């Protein structure tokens, strides 16, 4: 195999597995996005004493795992195992006949190990901090590659696996790594995307609360309010979205159904601040992805925004989008966090997958809870509260940004039926 990227290889999505706070399959998830159904609810843990809201998934952890395996592993690993198995089944693989050494697992994460360490500290606090009660499973539970590694153990994958620590840009980053490994010839099938178990850690709630960035609303469904002048912060969520990525030629050879082609991607850094984003760097990232795809801004039909419902984050992304796309009204800009909250490492992947069916139904799902748009976010193209029927959907662009100034963009293209596209 060549050690250089083969840019002639077209990379497509042939299977989707996901769990979100408002759906455990792409069909269910999409239906709830179009219906305006939120997945945010009150949430209690033994650590967080004050009332909080969160997006919590309700999938069958034992569909692909035995109870013993789940007890030994992690919530993030369980999310990953569920999504990866669902993706492989959806892609139509005869898994017993797949060469497992030619499969790679590339999962984006925000952080990993916080949940497990907090749990162990809580346990030993009940025994006067006697380390004899500390679990010997702690180390394999907390290493950064755990979620992807648990997938390989569960599915017998002997090819490479890794997690991509890219903060809240990680979901896109997982797709990008999978694409690159396919073009390098390292693997023939990439299980790629992003996962998060964030709602189970005290630290993330405490940190956002201390920053004044933790959302609250009497009606949980209205708590996540990107671009709205009355937004008051982030709703922390968990979830996962993992896709089967293949070379177009391989997918066609086995008669696979194809959801979309990845035609553009980019990552860059603000190099400015630990937390505060920079519109100009975000705009650069979007332009870089467009350039790699050979597209102009006018080619994009839907932009899936990153907006987290934090004041500066929403404002900076609005500036970036306006700088690149102007006021073209045929463009639809939407936001999935308004439905499910911020799924951290899974956010980019879940948000992109929620928009993929637009290739088929020609509908941009809404941004809900947008009752009074912040005048500092003057995007006229935002799809507010009700889905928008589109004249065409050929290209979808997904923004995903994270702390320490990491930015990522992925662009998908509709695949025509004659090439195997299911939305042709």
Image (cartoon, helix red, strand yellow):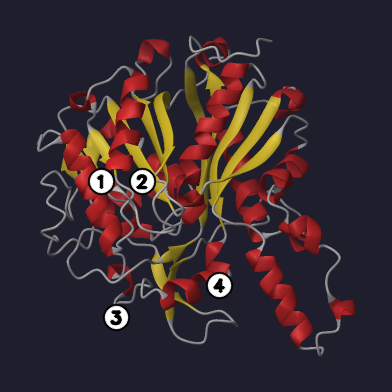
Q: Quadrant of the C terminus?
A: top left
How many other residues sit within 10 Å of disc 3, few (<14), some (14-19) or many (≥20)? few
Mark 1 / mark 3, whichever is N-terminal:
3
Q: Which residue is mark 3?
A: 218
Q: Marks 4 and 3, how far apart in space?
A: 23 Å
SS for callout 2:
helix
Circles 1, 3 touching at the beta carbon (< 8 Å): no
Mark 3 / mark 2, whichever is N-terminal:
2
Q: Of 310 and 156, which appears nearest the observer?
A: 310
Circles 1, 2 touching at the beta carbon (< 8 Å): yes
Q: Nearer the viewer, mark 3 or mark 2?
A: 3
Residue pictured at 40% horizontal, 20% vertical: 421
Q: Quadrant of the N terminus?
A: top right
Circles 3, 2 touching at the beta carbon (< 8 Å): no
Q: Of 66 and 300, which appears nearest the observer?
A: 300
Q: Marks 1 and 2, how far apart in space?
A: 9 Å
Circles 4, 3 touching at the beta carbon (< 8 Å): no
Q: Marks 1 and 3, how far apart in space?
A: 24 Å
Q: Which residue is mark 4?
A: 203
Q: Which label number is shown at residue 30?
A: 2
How many other residues sit within 10 Å of disc 4, few (<14), some (14-19) or many (≥20)? some
Q: Marks 3 and 2, how far apart in space?
A: 26 Å
**Residue 39 visible, this angle:** yes
Q: Which quadrant of the figure has residue 61?
A: bottom right
Mark 2 / mark 4, whichever is N-terminal:
2
Mark 4 / mark 1, whichever is N-terminal:
4
Q: Marks 4 and 1, how far apart in space?
A: 32 Å
Q: Which label number is shown at residue 365?
A: 1
């Amino acid at each position: 195999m060549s050690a250089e990227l083969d840019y002639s290889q077209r990379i497509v999505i042939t299977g989707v597995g996901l769990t979100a706070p408002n759906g455990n399959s792409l069909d269910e998830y999409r239906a709830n996005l179009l219906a305006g159904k939120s997945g945010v609810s009150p949430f209690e843990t033994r650590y967080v004493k004050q009332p909080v809201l969160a997006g919590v998934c309700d999938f069958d952890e034992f569909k692909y795992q035995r109870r013993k395996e789940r007890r030994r592993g992690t919530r993030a690993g369980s999310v990953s195992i569920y999504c990866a198995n669902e993706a492989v089944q959806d892609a139509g693989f005869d898994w017993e006949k797949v060469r497992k050494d030619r499969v790679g697992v590339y999962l984006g994460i925000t952080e990993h190990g916080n949940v497990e360490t907090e749990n162990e500290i809580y346990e030993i606090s009940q025994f006067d901090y006697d380390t004899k009660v500390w679990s010997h499973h702690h180390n394999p539970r907390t290493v950064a590659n755990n979620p992807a590694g648990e997938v390989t153990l569960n599915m017998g994958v002997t090819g490479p696996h890794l997690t991509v620590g890219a903060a809240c840009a990680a979901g896109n980053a997982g797709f990008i790594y999978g694409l690159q490994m396919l073009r390098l010839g390292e693997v023939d099938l990439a299980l790629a995307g992003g996962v998060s178990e964030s709602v189970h850690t005290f630290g993330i709630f405490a940190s956002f609360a201390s920053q004044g960035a933790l959302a609250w609303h009497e009606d949980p469904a209205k708590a996540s309010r990107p671009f709205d002048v009355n937004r008051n912060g982030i709703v922390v969520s968990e979830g996962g979205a993992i896709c089967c990525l293949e070379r177009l030629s391989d997918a066609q050879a086995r008669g696979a159904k194809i959801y979309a082609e990845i035609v553009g991607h980019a990552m860059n850094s603000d190099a400015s601040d630990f937390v505060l984003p920079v519109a100009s760097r975000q705009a650069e990232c979007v332009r870089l992805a467009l350039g790699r795809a050979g597209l102009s801004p006018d080619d994009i039909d839907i932009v899936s925004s990153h907006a987290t419902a934090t004041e500066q984050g929403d404002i900076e992304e609005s500036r970036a989008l306006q700088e690149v796309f102007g006021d073209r009204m045929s463009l639809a800009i939407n936001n999935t966090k308004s439905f499910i909250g911020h799924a951290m490492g899974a956010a980019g992947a879940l948000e992109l997958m929620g928009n993929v069916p637009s290739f088929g139904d020609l509908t941009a799902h809404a941004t809900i809870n947008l009752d009074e748009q912040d005048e500092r976010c003057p995007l006229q193209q935002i799809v507010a509260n009700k889905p928008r029927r589109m004249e065409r959907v050929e290209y979808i662009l997904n923004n995903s940004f994270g702390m320490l100034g990491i930015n990522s963009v992925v662009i998908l293209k509709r695949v025509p039926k004659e090439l195997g596209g299911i939305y042709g």
